[in-house]
Image: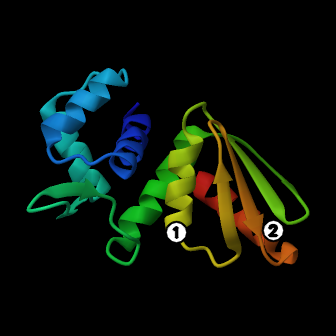
Amino acid sequence: MKARRQMKIQEIITKQVIRTQEELAEILHLAGFDVTQATVSRDIKEMGLIKVPSAGDDYRYAVPTEAVYPSNLQERLKRSLRETVVSINDTESLIVIRTIPGNAHALAAVMDNSNWEEVIGTVAGDDTILLIIKPKEVVPVVLERLTTLLG
């Protein structure tokens, strides 16, 4: 539940301007998550979210880049993979990751920020992520990395 909530938080703050923990808690409630402000506060801390300048003198929550929090990002990727992945398949230069419904977009965003040089792009739907790998000969390397993270 925590991983799903945190993936939803990431989705929310990348699509909307969220200025306060209370705003975030309200939107999470509307999305079906029963949270308190204290829970939201802990999630923000665990996820390493930062406040960045917004319009005017306002600030909004944002996801840091890997360069700022590399170990946190790797841990989030590992946790997200373990808690949401249903299956992984490959063909030629493509890897298809199936997730629990509603989780593909957030997981793909974390993967994009991981900057794996073999992954030239991701495409995410509701429960499916397409990884485009180049060159196709390194597909087994990426599969092994995913398998290791799934542990």
Residue for point 52% across, 69% down: 114
Q: Is residue 105 left or right of residue 28?
A: right
Q: Residue at x 50, y 47 (%)?
A: 106
Residue nearest the viewer, comparing 11 with 143: 11
Mark 1: amino acid? Ser
Location of residue 12 in the rendering, given as x and y in whole percent from the top left corner: 36, 42
Residue 44 drawn above or below residue 112: above
**Residue projecting furthest to the left:** 57
Residue 72 % position (x, y): 36, 63
Colouring chosen for the image of the structure = rainbow
User: Label 2 to label 1, Cα distance in Å?
Assistant: 17 Å
Q: Position of residue 64 (x, y in %)?
A: 33, 66
Query: Is 18 placed left or right of 109 in the picture?
Result: left
Quadrant of the rendered image containing residue 99: top right
Q: Which secondary structure, mark 2?
A: helix
* Mark 1, residue position: 114
Q: Quadrant of the N terminus?
A: top left
